[in-house]
């Protein structure tokens, strides 16, 4: 694979992955505050991550999936991230694609941030 987006496309792709990963990490911060056992946290992490990554376009073309799964893949935010990162590396990314990834990241922080802060206050 040779990324046609050049260094700028690669940097954009890396930046988008980092922003989304930091936003998504709030899920695990919240789980760490709510669940007391480290083994339980690891089990829940698998329950959260597997459906989101495996039911996306990261590994399989959605057109080969059954209709009900394809519908979930289409609304999965990880699918949007993967599509945008691929487009950035190929040099075909649009501002709308970047805005959707950034909006999804902001929504994760907006929802999970206050929940995590409340859990932290109740934890002390």
Image (cartoon, helix red, strand yellow):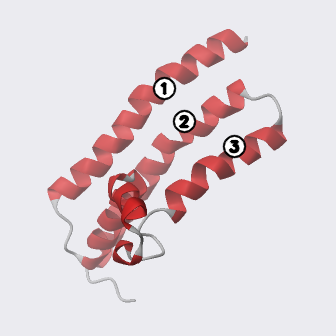
Determine whether label 3 and label 2 are within 8 Å by CB. Answer: no
Q: Which mark is residue 113?
A: 1
Q: Quadrant of the N terminus?
A: bottom left
Residue at the extreme bottom of the image, as rendered: 1
The quadrant where residue 57 appears: bottom left
Q: Which mark is residue 44?
A: 3
Give me the C-alpha separation between circle 1 and circle 2.
7 Å
Please provide percent x and percent y for residue 60: 45, 76
Residue 42 higher or lower than 10, as above or below: above
Determine whether label 1 and label 2 are within 8 Å by CB. Answer: yes
Secondary structure of the residue carrying tag 1 is helix
Mark with earlier residue (3, 1): 3
Which is nearer the eye, 74 or 107? 74
Q: Name the residue at 57% across, 14% down.
A: 118
Give me the C-alpha separation between circle 3 and circle 2.
14 Å
Residue 20 higher or lower than 87, as above or below: above
Which is nearer the eye, 77 or 29? 77
Residue 11 higher or lower than 117, as above or below: below
């Amino acid at each position: 694979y040779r990324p046609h987006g050049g260094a700028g496309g690669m940097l954009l792709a890396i930046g988008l992955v980092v922003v989304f990963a930091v936003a998504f990490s709030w899920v695990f911060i919240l789980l760490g505050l709510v669940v007391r056992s480290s083994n339980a946290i690891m089990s829940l992490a698998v329950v959260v991550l597997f459906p989101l990554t495996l039911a996306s376009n990261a590994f399989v073309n959605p057109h080969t999936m059954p209709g009900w799964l394809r519908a979930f893949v289409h609304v999965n935010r990880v699918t949007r991230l993967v599509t945008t990162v691929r487009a950035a590396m190929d040099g075909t990314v649009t501002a709308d694609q970047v805005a959707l990834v950034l909006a999804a990241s902001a929504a994760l922080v907006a929802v999970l941030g206050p929940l995590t802060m409340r859990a932290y206050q109740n934890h002390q």
